Image: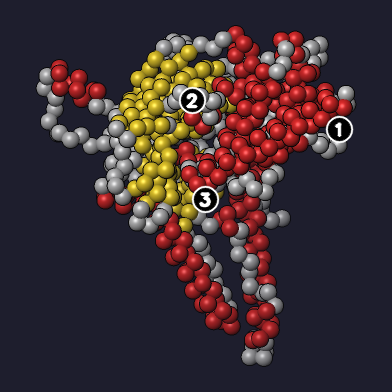
């Protein structure tokens, strides 16, 4: 009887059986969430090892079959050269996810639990596997493997593995494939180097200060836009059982959305930024803005909301928010915001990243730079919520994962001797002024109806609440059972999330709804069914028409010509629809 094998497959199977046995045990009395997270990560590692073993076994079988075919055809090798080239006997290459990528560590990371990999700033890592949760499997130069948060990494180059073992009859074809792959690899590496060196080149030219970096939050929006946009967070989230919703409930007595309280709910107002360095003459600034999100020091916990800043040519180092306007204030300029987050992290706060969208005059290249960042923790050292007052937050250089980086090198290297010099130096430090404020009882009630996690403008809360109510009616009230799989036909619910990514259309809806509210009585404003009916009419006769209008250009961030053209189309379309509706109303009144 042969002895039992103790290979990697058997070890993985043994670990799976052990995890199943532990799953049948009683729940631990301690930190259950942490224990559950550890077991899920352990299962993920086991599944990854099983997938790797299956790939290795498949490639080994293919190689053995090819060797057998070659041995049996040695006598007729010269006659079968042409056949061997096209019979598909060469082993298949592993999937593209196995091709490692080389990343550079931006900041030190210390392993917090088993399975993590401790790394230091400047270290080069080989990424083995990328996962959706943001924890990537990496290997350092010493061969140690573990998971590292992707926010601590910066891409440097991409390596593609090519198969080196081949038959003698296929040498010419393999050489051609290697040359093509090598040329593609060189082109990709050149593109990566261009992206990495853009900031260094601009800094060396004196076009940007030394503390500027590529925007971290803009990179997240570009790479994983759907995950960090507001349109993603206003969608209802299913519970773990997949049979109900986690954050959307309906009160059967009143027919309204049930209010939900979260651990962190704050309202704040952006006032201004002072002493922000300006780029040099070689760069044209297209937009000055602040990107905000919920942050716990390691990962982004909410959507990324952007507010554009205004400035004057006389004082370009001061950014202002929420300028006074005769009409409604556009959402993109409104610094009056709110944050709802249900995270358990004790270090939860708001991350503010000051940024500019630039255009290089010499090359015409567009890009996003971070002009510094700051963090406002929502609790004090004792764990109590912060008081409602004005806070002056110092602006740091680099990225949120770099420490002690100055935004701009000081002009004088001499240490300040007197108190007056220290006061002057303090006034020259870049800072962001933010005011935490309390919301009214009506606003607090409206905020409690929104999703558990969302950061957005306070002026749009009433529209978000109406969308939430229509969502609850369609998903919870109008459906006979939760198991009903019939398709839902709702133009409003299918297109409303797009408005959060196109703020000019959201402003058009605000303007149309404000005009409709002015003609309502107090009784009508309190009637929920009437409000939902009127909201549907206003939506379908305004922004829904604009979303499908062929004359409306595609939305593009920080593109002045496109923004001006969209503003003209939106204004002209709304005016035309308004006049046609008024004409129809007059005709109906005349016939009566």
**Sequence-earlier tag: 1 or 2:** 2
Asked which secondary structure carries label 2, the reply is loop
Residue at mark 3: 128
Which is more foreground, mark 1 or mark 2?
Answer: 2
**Sequence-earlier tag: 3 or 2:** 3
Classify 10 Å Cα crowding around label 3: few (below 14), some (14-19), many (20 and above).
Answer: some
Residue at mark 1: 484
User: Where on the picture, by quarter, is residue 92?
Assistant: bottom right
* Relative to 185, 506 lies left or right: right
Marks 1 and 3, how far apart at CA: 42 Å
Residue at image location 57% in from the left, 41% down from the top: 568
Residue at mark 2: 325
The dot on residue 324 is: none
Asked which secondary structure carries label 3, the reply is strand
User: Where on the picture, by quarter, is residue 62?
Assistant: bottom right
Residue 60 in sight in this render: no
Residue 157 lies, in percent from the top left, at 43, 56
Classify 10 Å Cα crowding around label 2: few (below 14), some (14-19), many (20 and above).
Answer: few
Residue at image location 54% in from the left, 74% down from the top: 177
| 163 in relation to 398, above or below | below
Residue 18 lies, in percent from the top left, at 65, 36
Residue 566 lies, in percent from the top left, at 57, 42
Query: CB of mark 3 within 8 Å of CB of mark 2?
Result: no
């Amino acid at each position: 009887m042969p002895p039992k094998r103790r290979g990697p497959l058997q070890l993985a199977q043994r670990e799976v059986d052990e995890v199943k046995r532990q799953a049948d045990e009683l729940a631990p009395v301690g930190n259950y969430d942490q224990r559950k997270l550890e077991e899920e990560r352990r299962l993920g590692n086991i599944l990854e090892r099983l997938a790797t073993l299956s790939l290795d076994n498949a490639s080994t079988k293919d190689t053995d079959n090819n060797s057998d075919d070659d041995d049996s055809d040695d006598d007729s090798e010269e006659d079968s050269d042409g056949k061997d080239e096209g019979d598909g006997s060469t082993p298949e290459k592993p999937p593209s996810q196995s091709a490692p990528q080389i990343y550079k560590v931006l900041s030190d990371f210390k392993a917090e639990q088993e399975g993590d990999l401790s790394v230091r700033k400047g270290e080069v890592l080989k990424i083995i596997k990328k996962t959706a949760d943001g924890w990537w499997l990496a290997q350092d130069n010493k061969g140690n493997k573990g998971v590292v948060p992707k926010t601590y990494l910066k891409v440097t180059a991409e390596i593609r593995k090519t198969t080196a073992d081949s038959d003698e009859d296929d040498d010419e074809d393999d050489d051609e494939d290697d040359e093509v792959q090598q040329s593609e690899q060189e082109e990709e590496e050149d593109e990566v180097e261009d992206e990495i060196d853009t900031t260094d080149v601009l800094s060396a030219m004196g076009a940007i200060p030394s503390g500027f970096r590529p925007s971290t939050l803009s990179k997240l929006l570009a790479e994983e836009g759907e995950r960090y946009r507001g349109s993603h967070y206003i969608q209802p989230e299913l519970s773990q059982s997949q049979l109900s919703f986690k954050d959307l409930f309906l009160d059967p007595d009143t027919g309204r959305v049930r209010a939900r309280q979260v651990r962190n709910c704050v309202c704040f107002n952006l006032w201004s930024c002072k002493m922000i360095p300006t780029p040099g003459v070689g760069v044209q600034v297209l937009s000055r803005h602040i990107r905000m999100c919920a942050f716990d020091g390691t990962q982004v916990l909410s959507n990324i909301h952007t507010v554009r800043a205004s400035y004057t040519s006389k004082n370009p180092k001061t950014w202002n928010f929420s300028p006074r306007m005769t009409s409604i204030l556009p959402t993109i300029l409104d610094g009056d915001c709110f944050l709802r987050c249900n995270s358990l992290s004790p270090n939860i706060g708001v991350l503010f990243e000051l940024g500019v969208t630039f255009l290089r005059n010499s090359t015409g290249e567009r890009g996003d730079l971070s002009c510094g960042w700051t963090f406002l923790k929502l609790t004090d050292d004792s764990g109590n919520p912060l008081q409602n007052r004005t806070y002056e937050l110092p602006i740091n250089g680099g990225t949120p994962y770099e420490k002690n980086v100055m935004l701009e090198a000081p002009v004088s290297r001499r240490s300040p001797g007197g108190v007056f010099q220290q006061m002057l130096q303090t006034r020259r430090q870049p800072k962001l002024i933010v005011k935490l404020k309390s919301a009214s009882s009506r606003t607090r009630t409206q905020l409690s109806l929104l999703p558990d996690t969302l950061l957005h403008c306070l002026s749009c809360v009433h529209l978000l609440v109406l969308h939430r109510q229509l969502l609850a009616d369609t998903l919870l009230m109008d459906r006979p059972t939760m198991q009903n799989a019939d398709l839902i036909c709702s133009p409003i619910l299918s297109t409303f999330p797009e408005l959060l990514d196109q703020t000019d259309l959201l402003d058009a809806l605000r303007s149309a709804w404000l005009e409709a509210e002015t003609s309502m009585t107090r009784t009508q404003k309190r009637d929920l069914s009437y409000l939902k009916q009127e909201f549907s009419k206003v939506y379908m006769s305004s922004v829904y028409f604009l979303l499908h209008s062929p004359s409306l250009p595609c939305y593009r961030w920080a593109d002045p010509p496109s923004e001006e053209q969209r503003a003209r189309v939106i204004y002209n379309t709304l005016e035309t629809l308004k006049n046609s509706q008024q004409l129809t109303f007059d005709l109906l009144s005349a016939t009566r």
